[in-house]
Image (tube, helix red, strand yellow):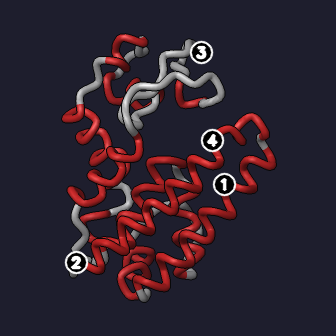
Amino acid sequence: MANFNNAIKFVLAKEGGYQAHPNDTGNYNSKNELVGTNLGVSAPVLERHLGRIVTEQDMKSLTQATAKEIYRKNFWNPIQGDKIVHDSTAIAIFDWFVNAGRPAIIKAQEVVKVQTDGIVGRLTLKALNEYDPKKFFDEYQDKRVEWYRRLTDRRPTLRVFLNGWLNRISSLTNFITKKEDNGKS
C-alpha cells in the first residue's frame, strides 16, 4: 500500500516555506487580504482548518506538524491514499491534488477510464489499483503538463508559475525513479 510519509516528504520538499506572491490566488484570505501560503497550505485551506479568517501571522506561524495534519485530512484521505496499492500512483495524485485540487482526480480518472466525477470512490480506487503503475504515472504526468500549459494560456497571470510547475513534475519523476531504483515502490 502507498505510504503517506513518502508522499508528504516529496510535497513538503517542493512546497517550501512562506511566500506571498500576489498572482497566487491561494495567498488571499476570505477578506481578499494577501496573507500568503506556508508549507504549501493556502489561506483558504488554513481558514477551513482553523474555522476562522486567517492573518499573515497565522500563515507565518504554521508548523510542519499542523501542515501534515491538514495534508492528510484534506488531500491524502480524499484520494484514499492508504488504499492505493502503488506509491507512485498515490504520490502523483496527491502531489497534483495539493497543487491544483479536483482536476488532479478527474485527470487520474481519465487515465484509468472511469467516470470523471472528481471523487475517488470504490470504482476509481479499483481501477487505479489494477492499472499498470508505470503506465499510469507516465500518462498522468503527460496530462499534468498539458493541463498546466492550458491553464496558463487561459490565465496569463499564472505564467509566472509555469516553469516551477513543470520543474515540480520533473522532480516528481526523478523522486519516483529513485524510489523504484532503490526497490521501495
Amino acid type at image mark 1: Tyr
Amino acid type at image mark 2: Asn
Camera-nearest label, 2 or 1: 2
Q: Are marks 3 and 1 in contact (CB under 8 Å)?
A: no
Q: Residue 117 location, x and y as percent?
A: 56, 64
Q: Residue 79 location, x and y as percent?
A: 38, 60
Q: Where, quadrant-wise, is the N terminus in this rendering?
A: bottom left
Q: Are marks 3 and 4 in contact (CB under 8 Å)?
A: no
Residue occupied by mark 2: 182
Mark 3 to mark 1 CA distance (whole Å): 25 Å
Residue occupied by mark 1: 148
Q: Where, quadrant-wise, is the C terminus in this rendering?
A: bottom left
Camera-nearest label, 2 or 4: 2
Q: Which mark is residue 161?
A: 4
In the image, what residue occupies the spot 28% across and 51% down? 8
Secondary structure at numbered mark 1: helix
**Earlier residue among tags 2 and 3:** 3
Secondary structure at numbered mark 2: loop
Residue occupied by mark 3: 32
Mark 2 to mark 3 CA distance (whole Å): 46 Å
**Earlier residue among tags 1 and 4:** 1
